[in-house]
Image (tube, rainbow, N blue to C red):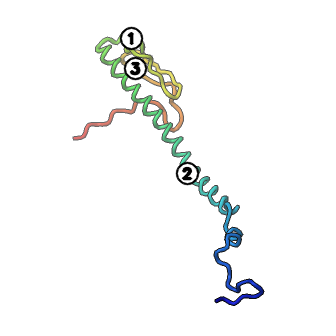
Amino acid sequence: MWPTIIGKSTLPNYCSTTSMKSKQKHGFTLIEILIVVAILGLLAAIAIPNFVRARAEHIRRDCVGKLLRIEGAKLARGSGTNDGTVTLESLFPNEKPLQCLAGGTYTIGTVTVPVTCSITNGWAPHVIPPPTPAAK
């Protein structure tokens, strides 16, 4: 048997619940929380500008697509008549009016004048790109 001193065992009590509770960690330290916040801040600093740029590029491409659609409808409608101005309502009578997502307005003009959007400044102007030369 294990030796006892005045009724108590000299064997250390490894299974005691009171000694286990006092050694357990509760929660996170301040340093751990600061490291997590710093990592999240770094990821946000990298991601947010890319999301803003991607959104602006989507809006620009949507507007250019609408400009090309209006230009094609205007050329198909006008086919040879250079007199008079065409309107969006006359080009697309059964659809809701086409609008630029950035809040710009479309200027249709005559058949010989290309369609333009009022958003022409900034790093992503809303203009119809020039035609690319055909490959030989």
Q: Are marks 2 and 1 in contact (CB under 8 Å)?
A: no
| Amino acid type, label 2 | Ile
Q: What residue did someone put label 3 on?
A: 113
Q: Position of residue 108 (x, y in %)?
A: 43, 18
Q: CA distance from mark 1 to mark 3?
A: 17 Å
Disc 2 on helix, strand or loop?
helix
Disc 3 on helix, strand or loop?
loop
Q: What residue did someone put label 1 on?
A: 90
Q: Is residue 131 left or right of residue 118?
A: left
| Amino acid type, label 1 | Ser
Towards the viewer: 125 or 12: 12
Q: Is residue 7 above or below residue 86?
A: below
Q: Residue drawn at (39%, 9%), measured in percent from left and top?
A: 84
Q: Position of residue 49 (x, y in %)?
A: 55, 45
Q: Residue drawn at (56%, 53%), measured in percent from left and top?
A: 43
Q: Position of residue 48 (x, y in %)?
A: 56, 45
Q: Give the mark nearer the N terminus: 1 vs 3.
A: 1
Tell which tag, 1 or 3, sits nearer the viewer.
Answer: 1
| Amino acid type, label 3 | Val
In the picture, residue 5 is in which quadrant?
A: bottom right
Disc 1 on helix, strand or loop?
helix
Q: What residue did someone put label 2 on?
A: 46
Q: Give the mark nearer the N terminus: 2 vs 1.
A: 2
